[in-house]
Amino acid sequence: STQPAVSNFADLALPEPLQKALADVGYETPSAIQAATIPALLDGRDVLGQAQTGTGKTAAFALPILQLLDMNNDRPSPVALVLVPTRELAMQVSEAIYKYGHDLRARCVPIYGGQPIGRQIDALSRGTHVVVATPGRALDHIRKKTLKLEHIQMVVLDEADEMLDMGFAEDLEAILESTPKERQTVLFSATMPPRIDAIARRHQRDPIRITIQRSTTEAGTSPLVKQSAYMIPRHHKAAALGRILDIEAPE
Ligand code: AMP
């Protein structure tokens, strides 16, 4: 990347309510991917990033999305579309956008397969700034014209390699073809096989390439991963772990 490294959120030209949101959630310094991605996106560039979960990649695209919003419309049509492989990730990314965009009164609708489509149609028709979707369901809504793409300024493909592995390649192509040509395109993937490069070549404009290794945690610091402790009697330990695995459904 040709971007200068940024060590402070204040150095990123983010609007005041976003700076406040970051202070509220307790983020002090941008992670490496945020320091590289946020200035590039604010500058109007496309980004092709190799980064895994735990690097802070969600905020790296969520914050630039949130500075696109036009708050002067009661029934906004989406300016950003985030495509993710799974329903869990759709909910997680939506929650992050909601959390950072709360003071801006940002609206974000997650849409994924398995949820009744009627409810999603209602939510979309009320107006939203951001849609976070799995590709199949996004395409259903695009074909029904319940998801309108004409005001889309940014498309994010999050965990693009997973989406390809799940067989979403054609859906992704169709969706990208339906969005305005002058949009910005962000592509994050844990791995960079040739198929990802091909999508980038077809759908991105001179992207800034960013590679972030999952950092090994230094002694005395915490990784950027949510950690929880459950205090339970020893004899409930196995049953409780079973319940947690059911709920979290980790891969
Ligand atoms: P992600 O890689 O986007 O799934 O983020 C991993 C975790 O890091 C999430 O729990 C975020 O809330 C947290 N996080 C993201 N950016 C920062 C930051 N700059 N400082 C501290 N925590 C962060």
Image (cartoon, rainbow, N blue to C red):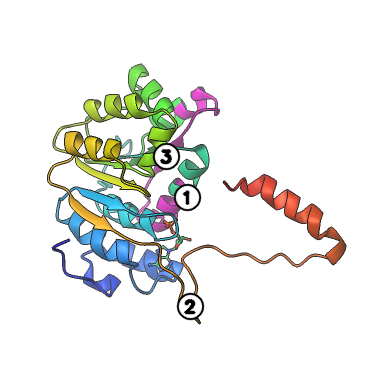
What distance separates the C-alpha of mark 2 from that of mark 3?
A: 30 Å
Q: Residues within 10 Å of mark 2 (few under 14, many from 20)?
A: few
Rendering coords of residue 125 (x, y %): 39, 28
Q: Is residue 113 above or below residue 197?
A: above
Residue 221 circle label: 2
Question: In the rendered image, is residue 103 in sight?
Answer: no
Q: Tell me: 137 left or right of 71.
A: right
Q: Nearer the viewer, mark 3 or mark 1?
A: 3
Question: Which residue sits at x=37%, y=40%?
Answer: 161
Q: Tell me: 42 left or right of 56.
A: left
Residue placed furthest toward the right: 235
**Badge 3 is on which residue?**
162
Q: Number of marks in the image?
A: 3
Question: Which residue sits at x=38%, y=66%?
Answer: 22
Residue 95 circle label: 1
**What range of the chain is rendered magenta?**
94-120
Q: Considering depth in this image, is 176 or 9 the residue closer to the camera?
A: 176
Which quadrant holds residue 8? bottom left
Question: Which residue sits at x=39%, y=30%?
Answer: 135
Amino acid type indicated by mark 1: Glu
Q: Is tag 1's residue or tag 2's residue first in the polypeptide sequence? A: 1
Rendering coords of residue 179 (x, y %): 23, 30
Amino acid type indicated by mark 3: Glu
What distance separates the C-alpha of mark 1 from that of mark 2?
A: 25 Å
Q: Quadrant of ligand 1?
A: bottom left
